[in-house]
Amino acid sequence: MVKVILHGCNGRMGQVVTQLAAQDGEIAIVAGVDVNTLAQNGYPVYASLADCREDADVVVDFASATAVDALLDACVSKKLPCVLCTTGLSDRQTAHVQEVAKKVAILRSANMSLGVNLLMKLLKEAAPILAEAGFDIEVVEKHHNQKLDAPSGTAVALADAVNQAFPENDRYEYVYDRSTRRQKRPQKEIGISAVRGGTIVGCHDVVFAGADEVITFSHTAYSRALFGKGALQAAKFLAGKPAGSYSMADVIENK
């Protein structure tokens, strides 16, 4: 049985993970962390990870970027691996994650979905072929109107997957807004657009637009449950792992 501390337990994703864990015979949530400590889910809830008294094998994080630094420091102090699902981290926070990964196991992914991570693999194979044939590349993501960061971490990760298929001296520039310029589209750019509205869980399209044809790689999430399932799979994988940086690709390869 893998014992989990759920960071951000009373948020939307935290509630989903709590429900999924209750149906999983290999996972037990022994404690939660949330600014809202009054809402109980069958386990004790603390205001910070540092306050947790329960023993655990791994932390699963679905909180906010503002809480990441304290979370990472507490993971080092308690020697706890962490599945870091929060997106929208600053460059400084990303560097902090990399430093902490030298001391404890950190699995970070912009998206916990099996489908999205498989899509990244396919993009790395398709991008060089289509780019050589002159296709332009655009990423369009759509999310609900409550999402704070834009573009989504997944959209940037998909663009990164494309860019990783090319040598460092021949990579694309990311462009988020073209309203301030009046010129033709340069070939070596990836436009990344964000749509916010309604209750959209998550839609991502990577568009390769060529002469007289368009190829679109798409992923649509219909429920937050798929992210929760991926996070629990990651927790099982990460428990007991040595210090280092891990990703969902490692989880998929281990299946």
Image: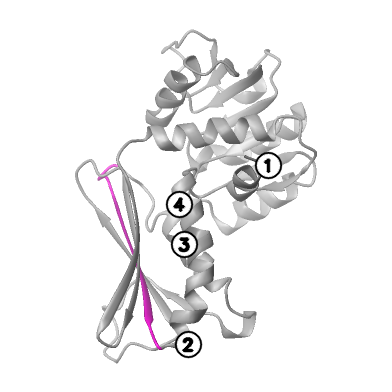
- What is the CA distance from the residue labelled 3 to the residue labelled 2? 19 Å
Dot placed on the residue nearer the N-terminal end, 4 or 3: 4
> Residue 253: horizontal and vertical position, in percent?
64, 47
Q: Nearer the viewer, mark 2 or mark 1?
A: 2
Which label sits on residue 158?
A: 3
Which image quarter: residue 103? Answer: top right
- What is the CA distance from the residue labelled 4 to the residue labelled 3? 8 Å
Give the amino acid at mark 2.
Answer: Glu
- Residue furthest to the front in view is 255
Residue identifier under label 4 = 116
- What is the CA distance from the residue labelled 1 to the residue labelled 3? 20 Å
The secondary structure that dominates the magenta segment is: strand
**From this viewpoint, is residue 157 visible?**
no
Dot placed on the residue nearer the N-terminal end, 2 or 1: 1
Dot placed on the residue nearer the N-terminal end, 2 or 4: 4
Which label sits on residue 132?
A: 2
Q: Is residue 203 magenta?
A: no
- Report helix, strand or loop for mark 3: helix
Horizontal relation, residue 254 to residue 14: left or right:
right
- Label 2 environment density (alpha carbons within 10 Å; few <14, some 14–19, many ≥20): few
Name the residue rendered at 29%, 85% in the picture.
Answer: 181
- Report helix, strand or loop for mark 2: helix
